[in-house]
Amino acid sequence: MEEKKFVNFKKEELGVKEYIKSSMGKGKISNVSIEYTPVGEKIIISTPKPGLIIGKRGEKIEDLTKILKKNFHLENPHIEIREIKNPYLDAKLVADEIAILLERQGALKFKIIAYKMLTQIMDAGALGAEIVLSGKLPSERARSWRFAQGYLKKTGNPAQVVDRAISQAITIPGVVGIKVSILPPEAPIHDKITITDELKKQIILSSEKAEEKPQKKSRKKEKKEIKK
């Protein structure tokens, strides 16, 4: 019984998140999280455009609160808006933006859209990025296209830092699947080597010592030959 209650609880929670995302529209919301407090439910909406979510004088927030109370039976939902300052470092926003551009401009321009978005991600300061498009691009057979730049971990603990998201674009040839992976600029990379002036000096000294050693050996051989 407890397992069924937990499953139903998670279904209701997912329904709330999906409703908020669909009601606000594609490309406007990155993430919706729900925190449960003694006072009520705290719903955190991450978005690059808080003005569109709030509305004039908070009208949209009030309407959304009423719907959540009525349709999803939430006791006291409190909506909090978190602004995303750089949307090109958010994988979900980038994936949705690619989907919108493919739907507007057509699937034939997928390479231009992918390369343009990739450069914008790297210009925003990302350490690495990868975009994978799957579908009928541009032929009748479905295939995958990969666009990548920079440094991106795919296995191990550093791979957990990578921000990943998926989206879909409904085009005339068919549905296009979009996968975006972004390594943010503040991500800790343990095997990263930063070349400083001190490191350069150490490399030069070690190379000079390595060159001196064989010369000493050759001198010893010369002395032995003279004694003979």
Image: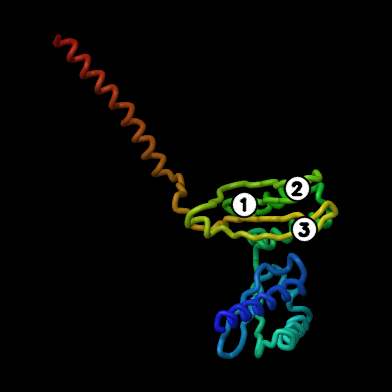
Q: Residue at coordinates 57% horizontally, 52% vertically from top-left?
A: 127
Residue 142 is tagged as 2
Q: 64 above or below 190?
A: below
Give the spatial CA distance, label 3 vs label 1: 20 Å
Disc 1 from disc 2: Cα separation = 23 Å
Q: CA distance from mark 2 to mark 3?
A: 14 Å
Which residue has dot 1 on it? 129
Quarter that holds the N terminus: bottom right
Decide: is 225 above or below 86. above
- First in sequence: mark 3 or mark 1? 1
Viewer-proximal residue, 160 or 228? 160
How crowded is the residue under tag 2: few (<14 C-alpha within 10 Å), some, or many (20+)? some
Q: Quadrant of residue 16?
A: bottom right
Q: Position of residue 183 (x, y in %)?
A: 57, 55
Quarter that holds the C terminus: top left
Residue at 39 percent of width and 44 percent of height: 198
Amino acid marked by disc 1: Ala
Give the residue pinned by disc 3: 169
Which element is circle 1 on?
strand
Estimate the x, y position of residue 113 in percent, counting from the top left: 75, 50
